[in-house]
Amino acid sequence: MLKYLLRRLALVVPTLFFVSVLIFGLQQLLPGDPAIALAGEDRDPNVVAYLRAKFHLDEPLPVRYWYWLSGVLQGDLGDSVRIQKPVLELILEKLPVTIQLATMAMLIALAIGITAGVISAVKKGTAWDYAANLFALWGLSTPNFWLGILLILLFAVQLGWLPASGYVSPFEDLKANLAAMIMPAFVLGNAIAAVLMRHTRSAMLQVLSSDYVRTARAKGLDERVVVLKHALQNALIPIITLGALEFGTLLSGAVLTEQVFSIPGFGKLIVDAVFNRDYLVVQGVVLFTATVYITLNLLADLAYFLVNPRMRVS
Amino acid sequence: MRRLLRRSGAMFGLAVVTFFVLLALAAPWLAPHDPLATSWSAVRHAPSGAYLFGADELGRDVLSRIIWGTRASILAGVVSVSISLALGVPIGMLAGYVGRWVDALISRVTDAMLACPFLILAIALAAFLGPSLTNAMIAIGISATPVFIRLTRAQVLSAKSEDYVEAARALGNPHLRIALRHIFPNIVAPLIVQATLAIAAAVIAEASLSFLGLGQQPPAPSWGSMLNVARNYVDQAPWMAIWPGVSIFLLVLSFNLLGDGLRDALDPRHK
C-alpha cells in the first residue's frame, strides 16, 4: 500500500510542476507589456508599477517563474485588480456556492445515470436499452447553456413554478435556495448522467456475465436481488471511481450554468474575471481547479486500490 | 466501409453533417436575408412567411443568421481538431516510439494539461489570447491536444511490438521510415474515430466560448453568441433561443453518432 502510494505521489509532483509552468506560461500569451495588460482597463500607473515590481517583470523568465511559484506555494495567487482582494480569498468565498451546485448535480446524475444504466444492461437489446442509449446521446449532445434557457422558458416563464435566476443562501432561506438551485443542478447533472449511464451499462454487462452472478441465479435467487445486490454492488466500484473523474466536466459545466442562471459561484468568477481582464483571477482559478482535480484523481485511484482486492494483491 | 453503411445511426449522422457542410458552403445563396441587416420594423418579429424562424432583437433574420452561423461552427470543429491532430499525433508518436525520458517528460506534460478541465483551459487560453473566432479555435485545439497525444502514444506502444515492425527494423529501415510508413498507417483508424468525436466536443466548446463572448464577435453570426443574446429575451422572443440550440444539438449529435458508428465499424470489439 505504502509503495503504491509513494509511486503515485511521485507522479503527482512533476505533474503539478508542469501545471504551474503551463499556468505561468499563460501570462506570456498576453500581447505587449504584461504589467499593462494585468493592470486591467484603468491601467493605473501605480498598479502598473506595483505589478512590475510584484512579478519582477524586469528579471529573466526563469527568475520570474521562481518568484511566482514561491508566492503560489505560500498561498499568494496575487490580488484581483478589479475587486482589490486576494485571489485565493475570492476563490474560497465563491467555492461553497459551486460545491452545493456540483453536489446536487452529481446526486441527480448518479440517480438518473445509474438507474438508466442498470435498466439498459438488464434489458439489453430491448426498447428500454435503446431509450437509455438515446438518453445518453441526448445528454452528450445538448449544450447545457441551451438546456438551461429551455428550462427557464418552461418552468419560470411559462409555468412560473421556479425562479428564472438568482441565488439565495441556504442559511437564509433553504426552500428558496433549493428552488433556485434545482434547475441549474439538473442542467449540470444531465451531461454527467449520460456519461455515468454509459459506464454503468458497460460495468453491469461485464458483471452480469460473471460466474458469481450465474451462481446466484442458479441458487434460485430473485432476479431483483441478483441485479441490485450481487451485480450492482460490484459494478459500482468502477462507476464511482470513473464518476470522480467527471469533476472536470462538472466544473466546466458550472462555468456555463452559473452564467445562465446568474449564480455567484466559482464559474461566474472566472467569466467575470475574463470580461474585466482580471487575468490573475483567471490564472488563479485554473491553478486551483487543476490542483483540486489532481488531488481528486489521486484519491479516486487510492479508493479504487483500497476497494479492489485484486489490485492490492498485484 | 460496408460495416459503417449498415449502421443507421451513423448514416443519419453522416447525412446531417453533410447537410450542414452544404449549408455552410452555400450560405450566400441559401440565406433569405442579409444576416447582418437590421430592421426596426422587424424587431423580435415572430416566425412568419417573411421570417421563417422569426427575427432577433435588432430585426435580423434568425434563419439567415443560423445558416451563416453554420460556417463558424463547422470551421471551429474542423480547424480546432486539425490543430489537435497536428500537435498531438507527432508528439504522441515521439513519446511512444522513442520511450524512456522523452516519453516520461511528454506524459507528465500531458497529465498537467489534462488536469485543467477542457473548457476552463480553453476559456483561460481564449481570455489571454484575446476574444476572436481564430483564437477560440486555437484555444480549443490546444486544450484538446493531450487526448490525441495519449491515444497516439498508446497506439504506437502496442504497434511497436507487432511482428511487422520487428521485421521492418530487422531489414534495417531508419526509425523515421518505420514510424511513418509502418506504424502510422496502422494507428489511423482509432485516430479518425477520436477526431470525429472531438469535432462534436469542439463544436460545443466553440458555442460555449461564443456564448461567453470569447468566440465569434458580434455582429458576425454564431450559434453560441445568438444564444447569449437570446437568453435576455426568452420571455418575449423564445424563437431566438430555440433555433440556434436545435442547430448545435443536431450537429453535435450527428458527429457523436458518426463517431460511435465509426468506432463500432473499425473496432468490432467495442459494442
Image (spheres, coloured by chain):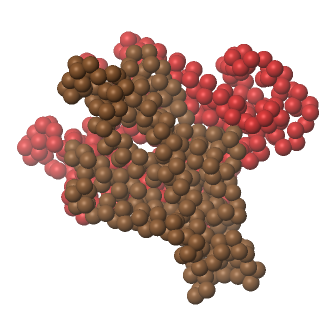
Chain colours: A red, B brown
Residue B268 place in picture, x, y as percent:
21, 47
- In the displayed orientation, state which residue is furthest to the right: A45
Q: Would you say residue A174 is visible in this rendering?
A: no
Residue A168 place in picture, x, y as percent:
68, 52
Residue A164 in the figure: left or right of residue A131 = right
Residue A16 place in picture, x, y as percent:
55, 23
Between B60 and A263, the residue placed more toward the observer is B60
Residue B23 in the figure: left or right of residue B164 = right
Residue occupying image coordinates x 67% and y 51%: B132
Based on the displayed image, in which of its 4 quarters is residue B62 positioned?
A: bottom right
Residue occupying image coordinates x 40% and y 60%: B254
Mark count: 0
Q: Quadrant of the N terminus of chain B?
A: bottom left
Residue occupying image coordinates x 33% and y 35%: B184
Based on the displayed image, in which of its 4 quarters is residue A153 positioned?
A: bottom right
Q: Would you say residue A17 is visible in this rendering?
A: yes
Residue occupying image coordinates x 72% and y 15%: A63
- In the displayed orientation, state which residue is furthest to the top: A3
B237 is higher (above) or lower (below) than A280? below
Residue A74 in the figure: left or right of residue A292 = right
Between A84 and B192, the residue placed more toward the observer is B192
Residue B17 place in picture, x, y as percent:
42, 62
